[in-house]
Structure formats: structure tokens, C-alpha cells
Amino acid sequence: MIQDTLTRLLADAVSAAAPDLGLDRANVPTPELLKPRVKEHGDWSTNIALVLAAQVGRPPRAVAESVAARIPTDDLILRVEVAGPGFINLFLSDRWLHDLLPEILERGPTYGRDQPNGKRVQVEFVSANPTGPLHVGTARNAALGDSLANVLEAAGYEVEREYYWNDTGTQMELLGASVEARYLELFGVEAEVPEGGYQGGYLRDLAEQIKRDLGDRLLEEDPVKRRQILTEEARRRMWDAIMQTLERFGVRFDTFKTEAELVESGEVAEAVERLRRAGYAYDAEGAVWFRSTDFGDDKDRVLIRRSGEPTYFAKDCAYLLDKAGRGFDRMVYVWGADHHGDVKRVLGAAQVLGIDPSRVQIVLYQLVSLYRGGEPVRMSKRTGDIIWLDELLDEVGPDAARYTLLTRSHDSALDFDIELVKRQSMDNPVYYVQYAHARVASLLRVASEQGVALRPWKDVNFALLEHQSELDLLRKLGELPEVVATAAEALVPHRLTRYAEEAAATFHHFYSECRVITDDERLTQARLWLSTATKHVIAATLGLIGVSAPESMERIGGDAP
């Protein structure tokens, strides 16, 4: 990549300037490349002089001028300028863009992906308890977590996707009691859903399924046994329904973990004991507490209740140990913003348990507000209360849903207008991007129909690509590796939707400015391969966010080249 070449040239220049600067060559840092926001500041820039100035006690501009004087100018680097407080700006010839195109074509669908880095990361997301279908709020969690996992894989990590859920405790007891009430009602037996129980219409559907499969045999069953059977039936069926919805949404998991496993394995007891030995767990009011105020929490938190039952937080501590014991270099949690209060105590517990808190990365996402044609959507036609994810997918499909849920940073609230999202027009971002991919596919089909066969790209002269729109497109295609690396490091997959739209817009501009199939056979070949590279890049970008790259979209303004 051009970044590697420029980094090497800059490092050589710094090494050559070291004697003049009084710098030990052994302590020369690796130069960092920056992408200037303004074209007039060059193609690439570096702040290496500002970094070195602090080491050598010289003014940054003087250091920059010493280094810049040793950067060779040739057919790649046309000129070098020192700017501002000491930035070194590099102005390149078009050669690097022409050299970039073969790299993209050589890599094909793998362009933008880094080599394995030997590090392991776990992304734990969704993790909804099996007490009801997945709702729209969970959709953002699923899209965010799955795309994060994809991006981290592309950045070279070995990734494990995990689903963690509670199959015991109060919520499951309430689910069993709620289903039991609906089941008994089906046979004319008067029953009430307990206070705090589940009221959704899906409970009636669940009870009817159980009635269909088990009949009335539970009516004469011992009440305790009946409740156990119905709780397990409800748990299993809801779990299956959640998995089916996630599969439909294009989300998969590698591993699953339950809170019951942590309790039964003794990991919860071990975690609490380790906190106690470290002096951060204490007894008070008949319970066991964690000194979370030492880590900025507003109050200490209960680990073990008076009843002897562990709290969710105690299980979170055990889960931290469990994850760390599996050797992950990064442990990514995807939580709703309503869990922001948990962050300080979880990171504090990690520190006490001997886990480097920097390994624990918690991504909090804000709420999704649903609209239909600008009007808030608060009621579900089917259930009367909550909008289920399956209902949303019925209307807009997984591609439009996933893309839209990733158009904003996770720390920003998201307005999701169903009518806008499902609109198949060029003012809808997901279709705009998909159309760029389909347009290239159409262009290649038309070329074939006209008898224009693609020659091997190694035989094509890409130096013929001189039009500004061609060069702009090449520059944009060259940004994908950097976008992927940034998205993985900062855990911001929304950068991919922004990049996808920029790449699509740059291609559409090129397409309007430059006729691809012309009488000039050599130029036609170069432009067809540039279009093919664009197709690879858009498909790779969409793939990272779990969105398809269609070969044809005739319903959007036709399929003509």
C-alpha cells in the first residue's frame, strides 16, 4: 500500500536527519501518516516533526525542514512542503493511484482486509433474555454488534461472537407464571398474570402452541411441576423464536453462555471471594456488597442478597473472569444506554479481579425512535404495545433495516422512519449505495453484449485514467483499508455506511463525467476495470455491515448503464 511506502520513506528521512537533530537513530519513532482535510495540504501529511521536537529540544518547524530536505522527490513524490507549526505535507503524482488499481483487483473481495494479527477479541451482543420476541430496540444492538464483529475480523482479529442470557431467576419465574395463566385460560380455568408478569399478545400465541402440542395433560399435573414444565416450554420456544429472528436479520453467534452456568460452575462464588480477599467486598445488612463507590459509582452495589441469591452484578463479575480466562485480548460488550450506570462498577470490578480494564470495551448505544411518514409509531398492529423486530423486517427487509441502524454513531439517538427506509429511490441511502454496485454489474453486462471483452487487467494501461473524476474515484477506493482499521480500533462501524455513500457518490459522478464504453478500446478497458474495482469495494463495504450487494435493481430508475 502507498501508506507503507510513504512510512518507509519518512522513516529513512528521519534516520538521515538524526545526526543533524542530535537524535539517536535507535529511538526514531514510526512516522504517523495523516489524511489532510483540504486538498491544498497535499495527499498525505505527517506530524513526526512535532513528535521529534519534544525529544530533541528544537523548534518543530526547524525539525520539519531538516526531515523534509531528506525526503526524495521523484515520479511518486512531486514535492514536499512544511506547513503550520511543523507538519510535513506530501504531494504525490498520479502514479500511486494507478498503482493502487492493480492492488484492488488483485485482492478482489478481500481488499480492505488486514492480515491476521494474532489477537483474539470477543464481541458479546444482543443477549436478550428469552422472555419475549426481539423488539425494535434490540435491532440496533444486533446490527451494531454483528458489524463490529465483521469489522474486527477484517482488521485481522480472531473474533468470537457470544450471546449471554439469563435462564433462571425472577424474569424466568414471571415468564412461567404468565404462560401458565394464559394456558389455563384456554381451558376455561380462571387465572391471572402475576404482578410484574408479561402481558404481550405473544403470551397467548405461546400458550396456544403449548396447548396444541401438549393438550390438556398439564391441567391435572401437580401445580409446582406444571409451572416447571410450562416455564421450560416457554423458555425453549422463545429461544427458538429469537434465533430464527436473528438468522433472518443475518446475525449469527459462535458461542452461548448462560447465567445458570456461571452459578452452577462456582464461578460466581469464586468472583465474590476474590473481591472479598482484595478488600472490595464486605458484609452489611445481611448481604454482601461491592465497594463500587471507590470507582466513581454513586453507591456501593449488592453482590449477594439477604436470601443468598447472587445479583446480576455478581454474575457480571463472574462473567468477566470467565471471559478473561478464555484469553481474549479485547472483550467488547454491546449495551443499551440504560446500562450506562453499570460501566464504572464493571470496569472497577475488572481492575480488582486483576483484569486490565483496557481489555474491557463497553459500547453503549442510544435509543431508536420509530416513525411512519414523520409521525411517531408507538403501537404495534399485532400486539398492541411493542414493535417486534420481525414486524419491522416484514416491512423494510433486513438490508434496509441494518443499513439504516448503522447510519449514525451508536452514541447518537436514531430516528427510523419506516416509510423513508423502505422507499426504493435514490434519496434512500441504502438503495443509493446498492444501486452503484448494480450499475457496475449492468455496465459489465452491456459491455459483454456489445462484444467488449475484458482483457486481463495486467495487460491494461491504467495511466490512461487522467480525468479528475477518475482520479477522485481511485482516491476514494484507496480509503477503504484506513476506514476499516479506524472502525475496528474505535469500534465505530457507522464509518462504513458513510464511506459507502461517499464511494457510491464518487462513482456516480465519474459515470456521469466519463463515458465508459467508447471508441477508444484502451481507455474503455481501463475504465471498465476501474468500474470493476469500484464494484469490489462497494460489495466489501456492504458485506462488513451485513448488507447485500445486488447485481440488478431494475425497480430503481431502471438498469441501464
Image (cartoon, rainbow, N blue to C red):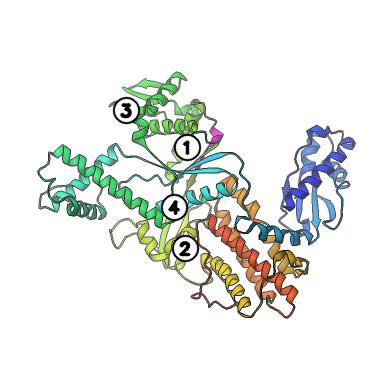
Percent x, y of residue 64? 84, 44
Residue identified by numbered label 1: 343
Look at label 3 and name its amino acid. Arg
Judged from the image, the secondary structure of the residue bearing numbered disc 3 is: loop
In terms of depth relative to the viewer, which is nearer, 260 or 105? Answer: 105
Judged from the image, the secondary structure of the residue bearing numbered disc 2 is: helix
Residue identified by numbered label 3: 305
Residue identified by numbered label 4: 251
Above or below 141: residue 458: below
Above or below 542: residue 526: below
Percent x, y of residue 528? 67, 71
Q: Residue at x 67, y 71 (%)?
A: 454
- Spatial CA span between label 1 and label 3: 21 Å
Image marks 4 and 1: residues in contact by CB distance under 8 Å? no
Q: Earlier in the sequence, mark 3 or mark 4?
A: 4
Image marks 3 and 2: residues in contact by CB distance under 8 Å? no
Is residue 298 covered in magenta? Answer: no
Which span is picked out in magenta?
A: 356-362
Percent x, y of residue 216? 12, 50
Q: Earlier in the sequence, mark 2 or mark 1?
A: 1
Look at label 1 and name its amino acid. Val
- For the C terminus, the quadrant is bottom right
Above or below 433: residue 312: above
Q: Earlier in the sequence, mark 4 or mark 1?
A: 4
